[in-house]
Amino acid sequence: MKLLRVGAPGQERPALLDAEGTLRDLSGLVADIDGALLADEAALGRVRAAADSGELPALDGAGLRIGPPLGRIGKIVCIGLNYHDHARETGSEPPAEPVIFFKAADTVVGPDDRVLIPRGSVKTDWEVELAVVIGRTARYLESAEEGLARVAGYAVAHDVSEREFQIERGGTWDKGKNCETFNPLGPWLVTADEVADPQDLSLRLWVNGELKQDGTTAEQIFPVGEVVRYVSRFMTLYPGDVINTGTPAGVALGRAEPKPYLRAGDVVELEIGGLGRQRQEFGQA
């Protein structure tokens, strides 16, 4: 299923994109697309049955904002330097263990919402990423297979990053990762049963129409199941938690000087095969 949330910020209602591409209203069946729903197999079964029956009312998508596909996000765990080609372009050794940092849930915006360049920023960068949404509690898992079994679905994430704040201002990466609007998510949450192999997904990103990133999740150093297993050894993952699994090569940081960092007025478009497409115009905070 392709689950999504539509409407004004803070007023989104649950919806579904059916097999024919018709937008369907789920608000009469579930309260929201969130961790509680993803952990409830019976409720998900009712949604699937209603979608298959064609009984869900259609929504007119014209002019309707698409919000983040997940409400009430618990935490966003991010994996850094998780692609072989991205490690090479930044001159970094592939990490022996996953690099973990966090984004606050309030960085999440819709897939086509305006993204704000922070005041004083000169190094705002782009990063297309596969987001993994947890559907079952993951705690001290023993195998990558167990990790995959905890995944409810997948989505497109844009891990917008301010490199000066991240790298040059001391401390952890978090200062360059948690600026407002720095995690567009969506358009859909695609349930795990529709993603045959999360290590066989194409990722692409364009800036002002120019292709910048063109990669595949096959390049991940730590695949999805292993990432979930590893993270579960250090913290408990709950339904509705999100893991951003890293970005392939092609970011501004990895390019020759002068590096083409983002400026107000730039338009970024990104997509992951089968998971949808985003488009953001960048403005000034």
Image (cartoon, grey):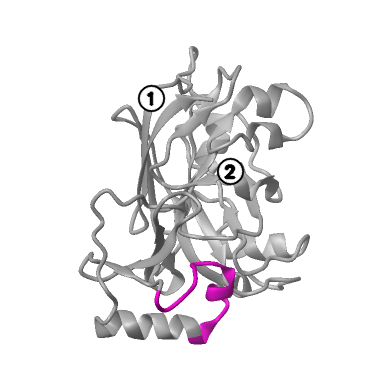
Direction from residue 167 to residue 190 in the image, left or right: left
Query: Between tags 2 and 1, which lies in front?
Result: 2
Q: Mark 2 points at which residue?
A: 107
Residue 26 visible in image: yes
Residue stretch in magenta: 28-42
> Is residue 31 inside the magenta stretch?
yes
Q: Mark 1 points at which residue?
A: 266
Direction from residue 285 to residue 172 in the image, left or right: right
What is the chief secondary structure element of the magenta stretch? loop
> Element at badge 1?
loop
Direction from residue 14 to residue 108 in the image, left or right: right
> Which of the two discs, 2 and 1, labels the residue nearer the N terminus?
2
| Nearer to me, 16 or 122 | 16
- Residue 130 percent coordinates (x, y): 48, 52
- Residue 251 percent coordinates (x, y): 48, 31
> Element at badge 2?
helix
Amino acid at pointer 1: Asp
Amino acid at pointer 2: Thr
Q: Which image quarter is the C terminus in?
A: top right
> Is residue 6 inside the magenta stretch?
no
Label 2 Cα neighbours within 10 Å, binned few <14 / some 14-19 / many ≥20:
some
- Residue 14 percent coordinates (x, y): 42, 66
The quadrant in which residue 146 appears is: bottom right
The quadrant in which residue 7 appears is: bottom left
- Mark 2 and mark 1 residues within 8 Å of each other at the beta carbon: no
